[in-house]
Amino acid sequence: MKKVLVFFGVLALLIGATNQEAKAQIIDGAYKRTDLNNRKPTPLPFVREADVMWRKKVWRIIDLREKMNQPLYFPTKEIEGRYNLVNLLLEGIKNGKLTAYDAKNDDEFKIPMTFEQVKESFGATTRTRKVRNVDTGELENKVVSGEIRSEEVKQFMVKEEWYFDKQSSTMNVRIIGICPIQEFFRDEDVNQEAVQRRQVFWIYFPEARDILANNEVFNPQNTARNASYDDIFLKRKFNSYIVKEENIYNNRDISQYLSGKDAMLESKRIENSIFDYEQNLWEY
């Protein structure tokens, strides 16, 4: 009889411990996901300088308002451990995992920035603004605390280099840096008629690949196979257009010498020249 009582007592303790452990480990889903934390960036092949017979640097814009690019913009706040691209970069800078570089003067990653300097470049400083009172219709002074408005980042600039590797006879591309572009209105522009754009900071892309590989992008077709941000850039699953190529005129933008439809055609011409170079090397 004593043995039976001891057995049931031990069984009750085991069941209680199991229930307590189950309550402690809450899994928001059918199973515990560990694959994402173990992801590593896809290794890139080594490139010898002697094998590069042609190269060209270009700068392109990824507009997050385009439907194909919206996975880089959403979610605007953290959901199930997922961040959008700009918040992911900001989190990395804040935690010291990424280095931000000043974007005011150049894009050559010369001047590192602290997180406080990044906030300043976002305009996240406490200041007084003119705000229209909804009830009276009059303009009133209002003190606005400094907060990073990441939802104002509507574009990203990507700096990349295309090169032809004669060893493998292939045209390849390496992303060098990425820069958020903020769209905002000046304080005096009460009616918000003239949108302003500014490059906030540059991130050296190879340094960010570890963080990009460990964070996923929502896949509307199958959430069990969400891609990482590193996959998105490596597989070129985004839409963009070229705004500048390296040139003799201080690497000037296309917008400095063309506008409208002509600028669009020039962007397409530069892109076609890259792919035509590879095609022209082959004989059929």
Image: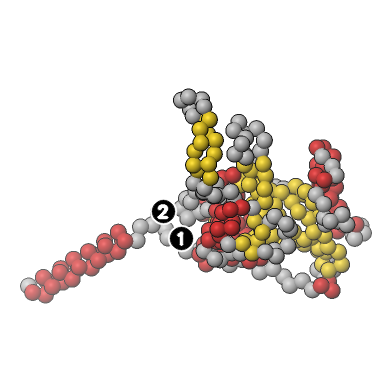
In which quarter of the view is residue 106 placed?
bottom right
Residue 202: image x %, image y %? 66, 58
Q: Of residues 24 and 251, which is closer to you in this image?
A: 251
Instruction: Provide residue 114's location: percent of width, then percent of height.
Output: 58, 62
The three-letter amino acid code for the residue at tag 2 is: Gly
Residue extending farthest to the right is 283
Against 188, residue 80 (above or below) is below
Q: Which residue is the site of mark 2?
A: 29
Q: Is residue 114 left or right of residue 241?
A: left
The reply, left or right, for residue 256 in relation to residue 206 is right
Q: Name the residue at 61% across, 52% down.
A: 121
Q: Which residue corresponds to mark 1?
A: 33
Q: Residue at x 30, y 64 (%)?
A: 21
- Local secondary structure at mark 1: loop
Q: Is residue 149 above or below residue 57?
A: above
Q: Residue 131 bears which disc, if any?
A: none
The quarter of the image holding the N terminus is bottom left
Q: Quadrant of residue 12?
A: bottom left
Q: Are marks 2 and 1 in contact (CB under 8 Å)?
A: yes
Amino acid carrying label 1: it is Arg
Specify whether residue 101 is in view: yes
